[in-house]
Amino acid sequence: MSAKKNVRRRSAEWFGKDGKDGFHHRSWMKNQGLPHHLFDGRPVIGICNTWSELTPCNAHFRVLAERVKRGVYEMGGFPLEFPVMSLGETLMRPSTMLFRNLVSMDVEESIRANPIDGVVLLVGCDKTTPALLMGAASCDLPTIAVSGGPMLNGRFRDQQIGSGTHVWKFEDMVRAGEMSMGEFMDAEACMSRSVGHCMTMGTASTMASMAESSGIALPTNAAIPAADSRRNVLAHLAGRRIVEMVEQDLRMSQILTREAFENAIRTNGAIGGSTNAVVHLLALAGRLGVDLDLADWDALGQEVPCIVNLMPSGKYLMEDFYYAGGLPVVLRELGEGGLLNRDALTVNGHTLWENVKDAKCWNRDVIFPLDKPFKDRGGIVVLNGNLAPDGAIIKPSAASPELMRHRGKAVVFEDIDDYKARIDDPNLDVDADSVLVLKGCGPKGYPGFPETGNMGLPARLLKQGVSDMVRISDARMSGTAFGTVVLHTAPESAAGGPLALVRNGDEIELDVPARRLVLHIDEEELARRRAAWTPPAAHSDRGYLKLYIDHVMQADTGADLDFLVGSSGAAVPRESH
Ligand code: FES
Protein backbone atom coordinates (compact mmCIF):
# COMPACT_ATOMS: atom_id res chain seq x y z
CA MET A 1 0.00 0.00 0.00
CA SER A 2 3.00 2.28 -0.10
CA ALA A 3 3.36 2.71 -3.87
CA LYS A 4 2.49 6.05 -5.43
CA LYS A 5 -0.18 5.86 -8.09
CA ASN A 6 -0.20 8.03 -11.16
CA VAL A 7 -3.74 9.31 -11.07
CA ARG A 8 -4.85 12.68 -12.36
CA ARG A 9 -5.96 14.58 -9.31
CA ARG A 10 -9.39 16.10 -8.98
CA SER A 11 -7.80 19.42 -8.02
CA ALA A 12 -6.06 19.59 -11.39
CA GLU A 13 -9.50 20.05 -12.95
CA TRP A 14 -9.57 23.41 -11.21
CA PHE A 15 -6.05 24.59 -10.56
CA GLY A 16 -4.32 22.87 -13.50
CA LYS A 17 -6.37 24.54 -16.20
CA ASP A 18 -5.23 27.10 -18.75
CA GLY A 19 -7.26 30.06 -19.93
CA LYS A 20 -9.95 31.91 -18.06
CA ASP A 21 -11.11 28.88 -16.06
CA GLY A 22 -7.70 28.34 -14.49
CA PHE A 23 -7.41 32.09 -13.94
CA HIS A 24 -10.73 32.10 -12.07
CA HIS A 25 -9.80 29.19 -9.87
CA ARG A 26 -6.33 30.40 -8.96
CA SER A 27 -6.68 34.17 -8.94
CA TRP A 28 -9.33 34.45 -6.23
CA MET A 29 -7.50 31.94 -4.07
CA LYS A 30 -4.43 34.15 -4.27
CA ASN A 31 -6.26 36.88 -2.36
CA GLN A 32 -5.41 34.77 0.71
CA GLY A 33 -1.71 35.27 0.06
CA LEU A 34 -1.18 31.81 -1.40
CA PRO A 35 1.91 31.63 -3.63
CA HIS A 36 1.69 30.34 -7.19
CA HIS A 37 3.69 27.16 -6.55
CA LEU A 38 0.88 25.75 -4.40
CA PHE A 39 -1.18 25.33 -7.58
CA ASP A 40 1.43 23.15 -9.28
CA GLY A 41 -0.53 19.89 -9.03
CA ARG A 42 0.35 18.88 -5.48
CA PRO A 43 -2.35 17.07 -3.44
CA VAL A 44 -4.99 19.46 -2.19
CA ILE A 45 -6.18 18.43 1.25
CA GLY A 46 -9.50 19.63 2.57
CA ILE A 47 -9.68 20.05 6.33
CA CYS A 48 -13.33 19.73 7.20
CA ASN A 49 -13.78 21.70 10.40
CA THR A 50 -16.71 21.52 12.81
CA TRP A 51 -15.30 24.33 14.97
CA SER A 52 -17.98 26.42 16.63
CA GLU A 53 -18.33 28.30 19.86
CA LEU A 54 -21.80 26.77 19.99
CA THR A 55 -20.19 23.33 20.00
CA PRO A 56 -18.02 23.62 23.11
CA CYS A 57 -16.58 20.13 22.65
CA ASN A 58 -15.10 21.28 19.31
CA ALA A 59 -14.16 24.84 20.31
CA HIS A 60 -10.41 24.09 20.16
CA PHE A 61 -10.51 22.87 16.56
CA ARG A 62 -8.89 25.95 15.01
CA VAL A 63 -5.66 24.93 16.74
CA LEU A 64 -6.08 21.36 15.59
CA ALA A 65 -6.64 22.46 11.99
CA GLU A 66 -3.41 24.46 12.08
CA ARG A 67 -1.55 21.33 13.20
CA VAL A 68 -3.04 19.33 10.34
CA LYS A 69 -1.87 22.06 7.96
CA ARG A 70 1.68 21.82 9.27
CA GLY A 71 1.75 18.14 8.45
CA VAL A 72 0.23 18.65 5.00
CA TYR A 73 2.77 21.35 4.11
CA GLU A 74 5.63 19.20 5.39
CA MET A 75 4.72 16.49 2.90
CA GLY A 76 4.32 18.86 -0.01
CA GLY A 77 0.54 19.09 0.06
CA PHE A 78 -1.73 22.12 -0.11
CA PRO A 79 -4.16 22.31 2.85
CA LEU A 80 -7.44 24.19 2.61
CA GLU A 81 -9.69 24.35 5.65
CA PHE A 82 -13.43 24.63 5.21
CA PRO A 83 -16.34 24.83 7.66
CA VAL A 84 -19.43 22.70 7.80
CA MET A 85 -22.43 22.97 10.06
CA SER A 86 -21.46 21.95 13.59
CA LEU A 87 -23.61 19.97 16.00
CA GLY A 88 -23.26 20.91 19.66
CA GLU A 89 -24.93 18.27 21.75
CA THR A 90 -25.66 20.45 24.76
CA LEU A 91 -27.36 23.41 23.10
CA MET A 92 -29.09 22.36 19.91
CA ARG A 93 -32.83 21.74 19.94
CA PRO A 94 -34.84 19.66 19.55
CA SER A 95 -32.04 17.12 19.02
CA THR A 96 -28.70 17.09 17.20
CA MET A 97 -29.72 13.76 15.71
CA LEU A 98 -32.29 15.66 13.65
CA PHE A 99 -29.37 17.33 11.89
CA ARG A 100 -26.84 14.48 11.55
CA ASN A 101 -28.04 13.67 8.06
CA LEU A 102 -28.20 17.35 7.08
CA VAL A 103 -24.56 17.82 8.07
CA SER A 104 -23.62 14.72 6.15
CA MET A 105 -25.14 16.36 3.06
CA ASP A 106 -23.20 19.54 3.76
CA VAL A 107 -19.97 17.54 4.01
CA GLU A 108 -20.63 15.42 0.93
CA GLU A 109 -21.54 18.33 -1.31
CA SER A 110 -18.76 20.56 0.03
CA ILE A 111 -16.16 17.93 -0.79
CA ARG A 112 -17.52 17.02 -4.20
CA ALA A 113 -18.02 20.60 -5.34
CA ASN A 114 -14.50 21.71 -4.52
CA PRO A 115 -10.93 21.00 -5.73
CA ILE A 116 -10.19 18.49 -2.99
CA ASP A 117 -8.08 15.34 -3.39
CA GLY A 118 -8.16 14.05 0.19
CA VAL A 119 -9.88 15.04 3.41
CA VAL A 120 -9.10 15.28 7.08
CA LEU A 121 -12.29 15.29 9.13
CA LEU A 122 -12.10 17.14 12.45
CA VAL A 123 -14.69 15.45 14.64
CA GLY A 124 -15.53 15.45 18.33
CA CYS A 125 -18.93 16.10 19.83
CA ASP A 126 -21.26 13.13 19.38
CA LYS A 127 -22.91 13.62 16.00
CA THR A 128 -20.00 15.36 14.31
CA THR A 129 -18.17 12.04 13.91
CA PRO A 130 -20.89 10.05 12.14
CA ALA A 131 -22.11 13.06 10.16
CA LEU A 132 -18.68 13.77 8.70
CA LEU A 133 -17.83 10.13 8.08
CA MET A 134 -21.19 9.55 6.36
CA GLY A 135 -20.82 12.58 4.12
CA ALA A 136 -17.23 11.78 3.21
CA ALA A 137 -18.15 8.13 2.57
CA SER A 138 -20.63 9.19 -0.09
CA CYS A 139 -17.69 10.81 -1.94
CA ASP A 140 -15.10 8.14 -1.14
CA LEU A 141 -11.85 10.11 -1.34
CA PRO A 142 -8.77 9.34 0.75
CA THR A 143 -9.92 10.34 4.24
CA ILE A 144 -8.65 10.42 7.82
CA ALA A 145 -10.75 11.25 10.86
CA VAL A 146 -9.08 13.17 13.69
CA SER A 147 -11.02 13.38 16.93
CA GLY A 148 -10.69 16.41 19.17
CA GLY A 149 -10.11 14.29 22.25
CA PRO A 150 -11.83 14.02 25.61
CA MET A 151 -11.76 16.63 28.36
CA LEU A 152 -9.53 16.08 31.38
CA ASN A 153 -11.20 14.07 34.14
CA GLY A 154 -13.90 15.96 35.99
CA ARG A 155 -13.09 16.66 39.63
CA PHE A 156 -15.65 17.72 42.25
CA ARG A 157 -14.16 18.03 45.74
CA ASP A 158 -12.48 14.69 46.38
CA GLN A 159 -14.41 12.87 43.70
CA GLN A 160 -13.77 12.08 40.03
CA ILE A 161 -16.86 13.02 38.08
CA GLY A 162 -17.77 12.10 34.56
CA SER A 163 -19.48 14.11 31.82
CA GLY A 164 -23.15 13.36 31.71
CA THR A 165 -22.98 10.33 33.97
CA HIS A 166 -22.73 12.51 37.07
CA VAL A 167 -25.37 14.92 35.80
CA TRP A 168 -27.88 12.07 35.94
CA LYS A 169 -26.57 10.99 39.36
CA PHE A 170 -26.55 14.51 40.80
CA GLU A 171 -30.02 15.23 39.42
CA ASP A 172 -31.37 12.09 41.11
CA MET A 173 -29.60 13.16 44.34
CA VAL A 174 -31.23 16.60 44.20
CA ARG A 175 -34.63 15.01 43.58
CA ALA A 176 -34.04 12.59 46.43
CA GLY A 177 -33.06 15.50 48.73
CA GLU A 178 -29.43 14.36 49.09
CA MET A 179 -27.79 17.34 47.32
CA SER A 180 -28.55 21.08 47.46
CA MET A 181 -29.11 23.20 44.37
CA GLY A 182 -26.00 25.22 45.31
CA GLU A 183 -23.82 22.12 45.34
CA PHE A 184 -25.37 21.01 42.07
CA MET A 185 -24.37 24.27 40.40
CA ASP A 186 -20.87 24.18 41.91
CA ALA A 187 -20.33 20.89 40.14
CA GLU A 188 -20.87 22.44 36.68
CA ALA A 189 -17.43 24.00 36.35
CA CYS A 190 -15.80 21.00 38.02
CA MET A 191 -17.16 18.65 35.41
CA SER A 192 -16.09 20.55 32.29
CA ARG A 193 -12.68 21.95 33.19
CA SER A 194 -10.71 21.75 29.94
CA VAL A 195 -11.16 21.76 26.19
CA GLY A 196 -12.49 18.55 24.68
CA HIS A 197 -15.56 16.39 24.52
CA CYS A 198 -17.26 14.25 27.19
CA MET A 199 -14.63 12.23 29.04
CA THR A 200 -16.84 9.30 29.95
CA MET A 201 -17.20 6.43 27.49
CA GLY A 202 -20.14 8.33 26.06
CA THR A 203 -21.01 8.68 22.42
CA ALA A 204 -18.13 11.01 21.51
CA SER A 205 -15.46 8.73 22.98
CA THR A 206 -17.25 5.70 21.60
CA MET A 207 -17.31 7.15 18.10
CA ALA A 208 -13.66 8.17 18.40
CA SER A 209 -13.01 4.52 19.33
CA MET A 210 -15.13 3.35 16.40
CA ALA A 211 -13.00 5.51 14.10
CA GLU A 212 -9.77 4.06 15.51
CA SER A 213 -10.92 0.45 15.55
CA SER A 214 -12.32 0.62 12.03
CA GLY A 215 -8.99 1.98 10.82
CA ILE A 216 -10.24 5.35 9.52
CA ALA A 217 -8.28 7.21 12.25
CA LEU A 218 -4.64 6.89 13.29
CA PRO A 219 -3.69 4.69 16.28
CA THR A 220 -4.31 6.36 19.69
CA ASN A 221 -6.97 8.64 18.21
CA ALA A 222 -9.62 7.58 20.71
CA ALA A 223 -8.15 8.53 24.04
CA ILE A 224 -5.45 11.24 23.98
CA PRO A 225 -6.96 14.06 26.07
CA ALA A 226 -7.79 17.18 24.09
CA ALA A 227 -5.55 19.24 26.36
CA ASP A 228 -2.55 16.92 25.93
CA SER A 229 0.04 18.16 23.44
CA ARG A 230 0.09 14.70 21.89
CA ARG A 231 -3.37 15.42 20.47
CA ASN A 232 -1.77 18.17 18.39
CA VAL A 233 0.94 15.75 17.32
CA LEU A 234 -1.74 13.31 16.16
CA ALA A 235 -3.33 16.05 14.05
CA HIS A 236 0.09 16.93 12.62
CA LEU A 237 0.72 13.29 11.72
CA ALA A 238 -2.71 13.01 10.11
CA GLY A 239 -1.78 15.97 7.92
CA ARG A 240 1.39 14.20 6.83
CA ARG A 241 -0.32 10.89 6.22
CA ILE A 242 -3.28 12.18 4.18
CA VAL A 243 -0.88 13.48 1.54
CA GLU A 244 0.60 10.00 1.19
CA MET A 245 -2.88 8.50 1.03
CA VAL A 246 -3.75 10.76 -1.89
CA GLU A 247 -0.54 9.75 -3.64
CA GLN A 248 -1.45 6.09 -3.09
CA ASP A 249 -5.12 6.67 -3.95
CA LEU A 250 -6.06 4.86 -0.74
CA ARG A 251 -9.74 5.56 -0.40
CA MET A 252 -12.25 5.35 2.40
CA SER A 253 -14.01 2.32 0.89
CA GLN A 254 -10.74 0.35 1.03
CA ILE A 255 -10.55 0.97 4.78
CA LEU A 256 -14.20 0.75 5.84
CA THR A 257 -14.93 -2.78 4.70
CA ARG A 258 -17.24 -5.32 6.31
CA GLU A 259 -14.21 -6.56 8.31
CA ALA A 260 -13.57 -3.05 9.62
CA PHE A 261 -17.19 -2.71 10.77
CA GLU A 262 -16.96 -6.08 12.50
CA ASN A 263 -13.88 -4.86 14.34
CA ALA A 264 -15.68 -1.70 15.38
CA ILE A 265 -18.75 -3.57 16.64
CA ARG A 266 -16.66 -5.94 18.74
CA THR A 267 -14.67 -3.02 20.05
CA ASN A 268 -17.89 -1.33 21.08
CA GLY A 269 -18.67 -4.37 23.23
CA ALA A 270 -15.19 -4.45 24.74
CA ILE A 271 -15.25 -0.78 25.73
CA GLY A 272 -18.87 -0.79 26.98
CA GLY A 273 -19.55 1.76 24.25
CA SER A 274 -22.58 3.88 23.56
CA THR A 275 -25.76 2.47 22.08
CA ASN A 276 -25.70 5.40 19.67
CA ALA A 277 -22.91 3.67 17.75
CA VAL A 278 -25.54 1.21 16.52
CA VAL A 279 -27.45 3.72 14.41
CA HIS A 280 -24.32 5.59 13.35
CA LEU A 281 -22.42 2.56 12.07
CA LEU A 282 -25.51 1.16 10.33
CA ALA A 283 -25.99 4.47 8.54
CA LEU A 284 -22.29 4.69 7.64
CA ALA A 285 -22.29 1.14 6.28
CA GLY A 286 -25.31 2.07 4.19
CA ARG A 287 -23.36 4.90 2.56
CA LEU A 288 -20.54 2.52 1.65
CA GLY A 289 -22.71 -0.35 0.45
CA VAL A 290 -21.36 -2.59 3.22
CA ASP A 291 -23.75 -5.39 4.11
CA LEU A 292 -24.43 -4.76 7.81
CA ASP A 293 -27.67 -5.02 9.75
CA LEU A 294 -29.00 -4.78 13.28
CA ALA A 295 -28.71 -8.53 13.87
CA ASP A 296 -24.94 -8.26 13.27
CA TRP A 297 -24.66 -6.20 16.45
CA ASP A 298 -26.06 -9.02 18.52
CA ALA A 299 -24.22 -11.80 16.70
CA LEU A 300 -20.82 -10.10 16.75
CA GLY A 301 -21.15 -8.76 20.26
CA GLN A 302 -22.24 -12.04 21.84
CA GLU A 303 -18.82 -13.38 22.79
CA VAL A 304 -17.31 -10.01 23.61
CA PRO A 305 -16.86 -9.17 27.28
CA CYS A 306 -16.52 -5.60 28.50
CA ILE A 307 -12.87 -5.11 29.47
CA VAL A 308 -12.80 -1.37 30.04
CA ASN A 309 -13.73 -0.03 33.46
CA LEU A 310 -15.01 3.37 32.39
CA MET A 311 -18.11 5.36 33.24
CA PRO A 312 -20.99 4.93 32.62
CA SER A 313 -20.47 1.16 32.95
CA GLY A 314 -17.52 1.44 35.35
CA LYS A 315 -15.59 3.97 37.43
CA TYR A 316 -12.69 5.49 35.44
CA LEU A 317 -12.57 8.16 32.75
CA MET A 318 -10.91 8.66 29.36
CA GLU A 319 -7.80 10.28 30.78
CA ASP A 320 -7.21 7.14 32.88
CA PHE A 321 -7.90 5.03 29.79
CA TYR A 322 -5.19 6.84 27.84
CA TYR A 323 -2.62 6.45 30.62
CA ALA A 324 -3.49 2.73 30.86
CA GLY A 325 -2.60 2.26 27.20
CA GLY A 326 -5.83 3.27 25.49
CA LEU A 327 -7.62 1.58 22.67
CA PRO A 328 -4.55 -0.19 21.19
CA VAL A 329 -4.51 -2.39 24.32
CA VAL A 330 -8.19 -3.26 23.89
CA LEU A 331 -7.59 -4.12 20.24
CA ARG A 332 -4.60 -6.27 21.13
CA GLU A 333 -6.70 -8.13 23.70
CA LEU A 334 -9.41 -8.72 21.10
CA GLY A 335 -6.83 -9.82 18.56
CA GLU A 336 -5.23 -12.31 20.92
CA GLY A 337 -8.68 -13.65 21.75
CA GLY A 338 -9.55 -14.28 18.12
CA LEU A 339 -12.09 -11.45 18.09
CA LEU A 340 -10.41 -9.17 15.57
CA ASN A 341 -10.04 -9.22 11.81
CA ARG A 342 -6.32 -8.72 12.10
CA ASP A 343 -5.70 -8.00 8.43
CA ALA A 344 -8.08 -5.06 8.19
CA LEU A 345 -6.22 -2.16 6.61
CA THR A 346 -5.95 1.18 8.39
CA VAL A 347 -5.23 4.70 7.20
CA ASN A 348 -1.56 4.52 8.11
CA GLY A 349 -1.10 1.75 5.53
CA HIS A 350 -0.59 -0.96 8.16
CA THR A 351 -3.05 -3.59 9.26
CA LEU A 352 -4.89 -3.10 12.50
CA TRP A 353 -2.94 -5.94 14.04
CA GLU A 354 0.42 -4.49 12.99
CA ASN A 355 -0.60 -1.28 14.74
CA VAL A 356 -1.59 -2.82 18.06
CA LYS A 357 0.20 -6.14 18.54
CA ASP A 358 2.85 -4.66 20.85
CA ALA A 359 0.51 -2.40 22.85
CA LYS A 360 1.17 -2.59 26.59
CA CYS A 361 -1.28 -2.15 29.43
CA TRP A 362 -0.16 0.01 32.34
CA ASN A 363 -3.19 -0.33 34.58
CA ARG A 364 -5.17 -3.55 34.79
CA ASP A 365 -7.85 -1.94 36.91
CA VAL A 366 -8.74 0.24 33.92
CA ILE A 367 -8.27 -2.24 31.07
CA PHE A 368 -8.90 -5.82 32.09
CA PRO A 369 -7.56 -8.93 30.33
CA LEU A 370 -10.01 -10.61 27.98
CA ASP A 371 -9.97 -13.82 29.99
CA LYS A 372 -10.68 -11.97 33.27
CA PRO A 373 -13.01 -9.27 32.02
CA PHE A 374 -14.54 -6.34 33.84
CA LYS A 375 -18.01 -7.56 32.85
CA ASP A 376 -18.80 -10.85 31.15
CA ARG A 377 -21.20 -9.31 28.72
CA GLY A 378 -20.19 -6.22 26.75
CA GLY A 379 -22.09 -6.11 23.50
CA ILE A 380 -25.45 -4.73 22.56
CA VAL A 381 -28.38 -7.14 22.76
CA VAL A 382 -31.00 -6.92 20.02
CA LEU A 383 -34.51 -7.70 21.26
CA ASN A 384 -37.41 -8.93 19.18
CA GLY A 385 -41.02 -9.75 19.92
CA ASN A 386 -44.44 -8.30 19.24
CA LEU A 387 -43.51 -5.01 20.86
CA ALA A 388 -40.50 -4.56 18.57
CA PRO A 389 -41.09 -6.42 15.30
CA ASP A 390 -38.06 -4.72 13.68
CA GLY A 391 -35.96 -4.82 16.81
CA ALA A 392 -35.00 -2.84 19.88
CA ILE A 393 -31.71 -2.73 21.75
CA ILE A 394 -30.40 -2.81 25.30
CA LYS A 395 -26.89 -2.40 26.70
CA PRO A 396 -26.54 -5.06 29.42
CA SER A 397 -23.26 -3.68 30.76
CA ALA A 398 -25.08 -0.49 31.82
CA ALA A 399 -28.18 -2.30 33.12
CA SER A 400 -29.10 -4.04 36.38
CA PRO A 401 -28.55 -7.83 36.28
CA GLU A 402 -31.67 -8.48 38.38
CA LEU A 403 -33.84 -6.74 35.78
CA MET A 404 -32.58 -8.71 32.79
CA ARG A 405 -35.68 -10.90 33.14
CA HIS A 406 -38.62 -8.83 34.25
CA ARG A 407 -42.38 -8.72 33.90
CA GLY A 408 -44.31 -5.67 34.96
CA LYS A 409 -47.27 -3.41 34.30
CA ALA A 410 -46.82 -0.52 31.89
CA VAL A 411 -46.94 3.08 33.04
CA VAL A 412 -47.33 4.90 29.74
CA PHE A 413 -46.30 8.41 28.76
CA GLU A 414 -47.63 9.50 25.38
CA ASP A 415 -44.69 11.86 24.77
CA ILE A 416 -41.89 13.59 26.61
CA ASP A 417 -44.14 16.47 27.72
CA ASP A 418 -46.58 14.02 29.23
CA TYR A 419 -43.67 12.33 31.02
CA LYS A 420 -42.37 15.61 32.44
CA ALA A 421 -45.84 16.64 33.58
CA ARG A 422 -46.67 13.41 35.42
CA ILE A 423 -43.52 11.55 36.48
CA ASP A 424 -43.49 13.15 39.93
CA ASP A 425 -47.27 13.27 40.35
CA PRO A 426 -47.93 11.74 43.78
CA ASN A 427 -51.00 10.05 42.32
CA LEU A 428 -49.08 8.28 39.54
CA ASP A 429 -49.85 4.59 39.83
CA VAL A 430 -46.28 3.30 39.77
CA ASP A 431 -44.06 1.04 41.84
CA ALA A 432 -40.58 -0.42 41.50
CA ASP A 433 -41.87 -3.31 39.38
CA SER A 434 -43.63 -1.09 36.87
CA VAL A 435 -42.30 -0.72 33.34
CA LEU A 436 -42.02 2.91 32.24
CA VAL A 437 -43.02 3.33 28.60
CA LEU A 438 -42.28 6.48 26.63
CA LYS A 439 -43.71 7.05 23.14
CA GLY A 440 -43.15 9.66 20.47
CA CYS A 441 -39.35 9.86 20.62
CA GLY A 442 -38.22 7.89 17.57
CA PRO A 443 -36.71 9.26 14.35
CA LYS A 444 -40.02 10.79 13.21
CA GLY A 445 -41.27 11.50 16.71
CA TYR A 446 -40.33 14.54 18.82
CA PRO A 447 -38.90 15.02 15.96
CA GLY A 448 -35.34 13.82 15.56
CA PHE A 449 -34.81 10.76 17.74
CA PRO A 450 -33.75 12.47 20.99
CA GLU A 451 -31.80 10.99 23.91
CA THR A 452 -34.76 10.73 26.23
CA GLY A 453 -34.75 6.95 26.65
CA ASN A 454 -33.11 6.94 30.09
CA MET A 455 -36.03 8.79 31.63
CA GLY A 456 -35.53 9.57 35.30
CA LEU A 457 -37.39 7.52 37.89
CA PRO A 458 -40.29 8.94 39.92
CA ALA A 459 -38.94 11.01 42.82
CA ARG A 460 -41.17 9.06 45.20
CA LEU A 461 -39.42 5.81 44.28
CA LEU A 462 -35.95 7.41 44.33
CA LYS A 463 -36.60 8.48 47.91
CA GLN A 464 -37.51 4.88 48.72
CA GLY A 465 -34.07 3.82 47.43
CA VAL A 466 -35.15 2.47 44.02
CA SER A 467 -32.22 3.04 41.67
CA ASP A 468 -33.28 1.33 38.45
CA MET A 469 -36.43 0.25 36.65
CA VAL A 470 -37.17 -1.20 33.23
CA ARG A 471 -37.76 1.61 30.78
CA ILE A 472 -38.86 1.16 27.18
CA SER A 473 -39.05 3.74 24.40
CA ASP A 474 -38.39 4.43 20.75
CA ALA A 475 -35.83 7.05 21.81
CA ARG A 476 -32.05 6.92 21.98
CA MET A 477 -30.05 7.29 25.18
CA SER A 478 -27.02 9.43 25.89
CA GLY A 479 -23.86 7.37 25.80
CA THR A 480 -23.10 8.71 29.26
CA ALA A 481 -26.31 7.25 30.69
CA PHE A 482 -27.04 3.94 32.34
CA GLY A 483 -29.91 1.79 33.52
CA THR A 484 -32.14 -1.05 32.30
CA VAL A 485 -33.25 0.89 29.30
CA VAL A 486 -34.71 -0.57 26.10
CA LEU A 487 -34.10 1.77 23.18
CA HIS A 488 -34.63 2.28 19.44
CA THR A 489 -37.86 0.26 19.44
CA ALA A 490 -38.81 -0.20 15.79
CA PRO A 491 -41.05 0.64 14.15
CA GLU A 492 -41.42 3.72 16.34
CA SER A 493 -44.75 4.81 17.76
CA ALA A 494 -45.06 7.84 15.44
CA ALA A 495 -44.83 5.43 12.50
CA GLY A 496 -47.58 3.22 13.95
CA GLY A 497 -45.32 0.64 15.59
CA PRO A 498 -46.82 -1.54 18.36
CA LEU A 499 -45.32 0.79 20.97
CA ALA A 500 -48.06 3.25 19.97
CA LEU A 501 -50.68 0.75 21.12
CA VAL A 502 -49.43 0.14 24.67
CA ARG A 503 -51.77 1.31 27.43
CA ASN A 504 -51.43 1.77 31.19
CA GLY A 505 -51.60 -1.52 33.02
CA ASP A 506 -50.62 -3.71 30.03
CA GLU A 507 -48.20 -6.42 31.03
CA ILE A 508 -44.79 -6.26 29.39
CA GLU A 509 -42.11 -8.93 29.51
CA LEU A 510 -38.43 -8.20 29.04
CA ASP A 511 -36.22 -11.27 28.71
CA VAL A 512 -32.74 -10.20 27.69
CA PRO A 513 -31.16 -13.71 27.65
CA ALA A 514 -33.99 -14.88 25.35
CA ARG A 515 -33.89 -11.58 23.43
CA ARG A 516 -37.61 -11.04 23.86
CA LEU A 517 -39.71 -7.95 24.33
CA VAL A 518 -43.33 -8.96 24.56
CA LEU A 519 -46.57 -7.09 25.09
CA HIS A 520 -48.94 -9.59 26.69
CA ILE A 521 -52.11 -8.53 24.95
CA ASP A 522 -54.17 -10.84 22.81
CA GLU A 523 -54.09 -10.33 19.06
CA GLU A 524 -57.72 -9.27 18.77
CA GLU A 525 -57.32 -6.48 21.30
CA LEU A 526 -54.13 -5.38 19.56
CA ALA A 527 -55.97 -5.30 16.22
CA ARG A 528 -58.78 -3.21 17.77
CA ARG A 529 -56.26 -0.72 19.10
CA ARG A 530 -54.45 -0.61 15.78
CA ALA A 531 -57.65 0.16 13.93
CA ALA A 532 -58.39 3.01 16.32
CA TRP A 533 -54.86 4.50 16.10
CA THR A 534 -54.35 7.79 14.29
CA PRO A 535 -50.91 9.14 13.40
CA PRO A 536 -49.69 12.23 15.22
CA ALA A 537 -49.96 15.60 13.48
CA ALA A 538 -47.05 16.56 11.19
CA HIS A 539 -44.33 18.55 12.94
CA SER A 540 -43.87 20.89 10.01
CA ASP A 541 -44.95 21.33 6.41
CA ARG A 542 -41.84 23.08 5.18
CA GLY A 543 -38.07 23.25 5.17
CA TYR A 544 -35.54 20.68 6.31
CA LEU A 545 -37.91 19.36 8.94
CA LYS A 546 -40.40 18.30 6.27
CA LEU A 547 -37.67 16.74 4.16
CA TYR A 548 -36.44 14.86 7.22
CA ILE A 549 -39.85 13.59 8.33
CA ASP A 550 -40.76 12.51 4.81
CA HIS A 551 -37.56 10.58 4.26
CA VAL A 552 -36.03 9.43 7.55
CA MET A 553 -35.77 5.67 7.90
CA GLN A 554 -36.30 3.72 11.09
CA ALA A 555 -33.74 3.05 13.81
CA ASP A 556 -33.05 -0.53 12.76
CA THR A 557 -31.43 0.70 9.54
CA GLY A 558 -29.58 3.66 11.04
CA ALA A 559 -32.11 6.50 10.64
CA ASP A 560 -30.48 7.88 7.51
CA LEU A 561 -32.58 9.67 4.91
CA ASP A 562 -33.66 7.14 2.31
CA PHE A 563 -32.25 9.11 -0.64
CA LEU A 564 -28.82 9.46 0.99
CA VAL A 565 -28.09 5.75 1.21
CA GLY A 566 -25.16 4.86 -1.04
CA SER A 567 -22.54 6.98 -2.72
CA SER A 568 -22.36 9.40 -5.63
CA GLY A 569 -18.57 9.23 -5.76
CA ALA A 570 -16.18 12.10 -6.27
CA ALA A 571 -16.48 12.74 -10.00
CA VAL A 572 -15.69 16.36 -10.81
CA PRO A 573 -18.85 18.38 -11.46
CA ARG A 574 -19.18 20.53 -14.58
CA GLU A 575 -17.48 23.90 -14.86
CA SER A 576 -19.76 26.76 -13.79
CA HIS A 577 -18.46 29.64 -15.88
FE1 FES B 1 -20.19 17.05 23.24
FE2 FES B 1 -20.76 15.13 25.13
S1 FES B 1 -21.64 17.10 24.85
S2 FES B 1 -19.40 15.08 23.50
Image (cartoon, grey):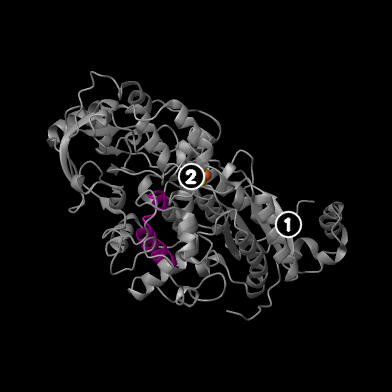
Residue at x 41%, y 50% (from the top left corner): 279
Q: Quadrant of residue 45?
A: bottom right
Residue 277 among magenta residues = yes
Q: Is residue 373 above or below residue 436?
A: below
Residue 24 among magenta residues = no
In the image, the segment drawn in magenta is 259-279
Q: Residues within 10 Å of mark 1 (few under 14, many from 20)?
A: some
Residue at x 29%, y 42% (from the top left corner): 485
- Magenta stretch prevailing secondary structure: helix
Q: Is residue 301 above or below residue 414?
A: below
Q: What residue sits right under mark 1 in the picture?
A: 80
Q: Is residue 568 above or below residue 556?
A: below
Q: Nearer the viewer, residue 111 or 229?
A: 229
Give x and y (percent) for residue 118. Answer: 65, 63
Q: What residue sits right under mark 2 in the picture?
A: 155
Task: Please name the amino acid that badge 1 sits on.
Answer: Leu
Query: What label sits on residue 241 in the rendered view?
Result: none
Of circles 2 and 1, which is in front?
2
Q: Quadrant of residue 12?
A: bottom right
Task: Please name the amino acid that badge 2 sits on.
Answer: Arg
